[in-house]
Amino acid sequence: MQMTDWAAEHSAALREYLAKGMPFSEIADAINAKFKTAYSRNAAIGRARRMGLAGPDRPQMPPRLDRLRELRPAKSRTADFHWPMPAFEKAEPVKLRCVEIEPRHLSLVELERGDCRYPYGGDSEGEAITFCGHPRRRGSSYCTPHFHLSRNPDLPSEQAASTASLRVVEAA
């Protein structure tokens, strides 16, 4: 922001134009034309405030009635084309994948360095989020059952069975 020092003549012109009731934009234009300056409307307002000439007690210009038009009813804002409402069918609840492990339900503050960070809860507003808390698998943030759950959509028991059958096929 550039500091400007108003010359005494400029301040006197500002005071004179304000006494005539001119708006600040026109005052700035008149001072710029008269003194070959480049004051903005906001500069004129700021200077008038610092001089104690502008503020909430300054009389406002009456509204220009020629700008007002006759009132007309508002147009409808609804769209002419409406999308059809989709038909919703009752869906069976999704069976969530889970592991056969009882979580310790530790808070984030209670977790130790080697504890599983698999989250539980937090599904509804205000529900606390807890963590599994069992010993972590090496190289992972989760315990072994949660590691397999997060890597493969099969349940750990199904995964072990499919891995065993693959070994048999490979050996044959």
Image: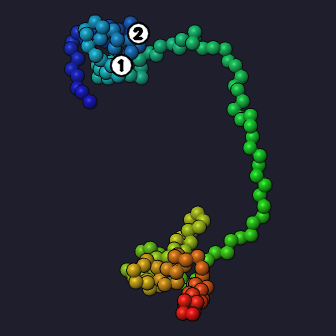
Q: Secondary structure at mark 1?
A: helix
Which residue is at 59% across, 67% downward? 123
Looking at the rendered image, the quarter that the N terminus falls into is: top left
Amino acid under label 2?
Gly
Which residue is at 42% across, 74% downward? 109
Tell me residue 55's x, y (percent).
38, 22
Which residue is at 71% across, 35% downward? 79
Number of marks:
2
Which residue has dot 1 on it?
Answer: 41
Query: Where is 29 relative to 106, above or below?
Result: above
Quick check: marks 1 and 2 in contact, CB under 8 Å? no
Q: Quadrant of residue 11?
A: top left
Q: Nearer the viewer, residue 63 or 59?
A: 63
Which residue is at 63% across, 14% downward? 69
Amino acid under label 1?
Arg
Q: Is residue 131 visible?
A: no
Q: Nearer the viewer, residue 13 or 82?
A: 82
Which residue has dot 2 on it?
Answer: 21
